[in-house]
Amino acid sequence: MNRISEISIFFPFWNEEKNIQSVVEKAIPVAQRVADKWEIIMVDDGSSDKTLEIAKKLAQKNSNLVVAANKVNGGYGAALKKGFATAKYKFVVFNDGDGQFDFSEVSKFLEKIKDYDMVIGYRKKRLDNSFRHILMNLLKIWDLVFFGFRFRDIDCGFKLFKKEALEKILPLKSEGAMITTEILAKAKKAKLNIAEVEVNHYPRVYGDQSGGNIRVILRAVKESLRLWKELSF
């Protein structure tokens, strides 16, 4: 794979004090390998543990590491929006900060990005509980009915963008989990070219998932209906 000139990498973190250092330290050599100029943005979404403290210590040791923090926990969408707003290079990739992806697989995305506006991952085998699998399938049906698109893994937390294409779908409004639907719905409306690549998914070792929380689900439904109204599908 040829090196690219520059890339902004960001990880959203919320109460990931046991994961953040490992996730970031594994990403550094990958960034050095794939790009001439790079930054890793550690987005803390109002964590109540030591996530932000650890992020600041890591940034003190490496000038390529950047801390971006939301004062209060706003949700997955709020974290992604913070990352997008902070990213400065012409390629932007985000990867969930829970350690369930191997960031070195970004090479698969970079191989395709020259011919596409966005490259999105789909999990080869999703290693979540059965309820999360049910939610994933319901989301696929929901997005097909309301927004007219179909992808293998809508909410996979591994996506790469050309910054010029990303700017065509901004601003994003969703604060919660429906951010991924908003990204894809707006990309569809903007007629962006999207490629899908397979990635591996690993069990969560530390911390808890919040995606199956009933409040998260209800918020997602509300945001989805607002998005549908906004885009006039």
Image (cartoon, rainbow, N blue to C red):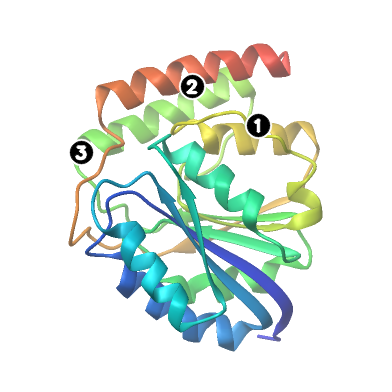
Residue positioned 48% across, 22% down in the render: 142
Q: Is residue 120 above or below residue 61?
A: above
For the question of whether residue 114 can be seen, the reply is yes
Q: Is residue 119 above or below residue 185?
A: below
> Does dot 3 land on a helix, a strand or a loop?
helix
Q: Is residue 79 above or below residue 182?
A: below
> Does dot 2 land on a helix, a strand or a loop?
helix
**Mark 3 or 2, nearer chain start:** 3
Categorize mark 1 by other alpha carbons within 10 Å: few (<14), some (14-19), many (20+): many
Instruction: Give the image location of residue 225, x and y in percent.
Output: 54, 13
Distance between the Cα atoms at labels 1 and 3? 26 Å
Q: Which quadrant is the N terminus positioned in?
A: bottom right
Q: Looking at the picture, which amino acid does disc 2 mark?
A: Trp
Residue indicated by mark 1: 185
**Mark 1 or 2, nearer chain start:** 2
In the drawing, does residue 21 fall left or right of residue 162?
left
Categorize mark 3 by other alpha carbons within 10 Å: few (<14), some (14-19), many (20+): few
Instruction: Give the image location of residue 200, x and y in percent.
Output: 38, 65
Q: Looking at the picture, which amino acid does disc 1 mark?
A: Ala
Residue indicated by mark 2: 142
Q: Which quadrant is the C terminus positioned in?
A: top right
Instruction: Give the image location of residue 98, x and y in percent.
Output: 32, 58
Q: Quadrant of residue 38?
A: bottom right
In the drawing, does residue 27 fall left or right of residue 110?
left
Whether label 1 touches label 2, CB < 8 Å: no
For the question of whether residue 99 can be seen, the reply is no
**Mark 1 or 3, nearer chain start:** 3
Relative depth, front residue between 186 and 46? 46
> Does dot 1 land on a helix, a strand or a loop?
helix
**Disc marking residue 130:** 3
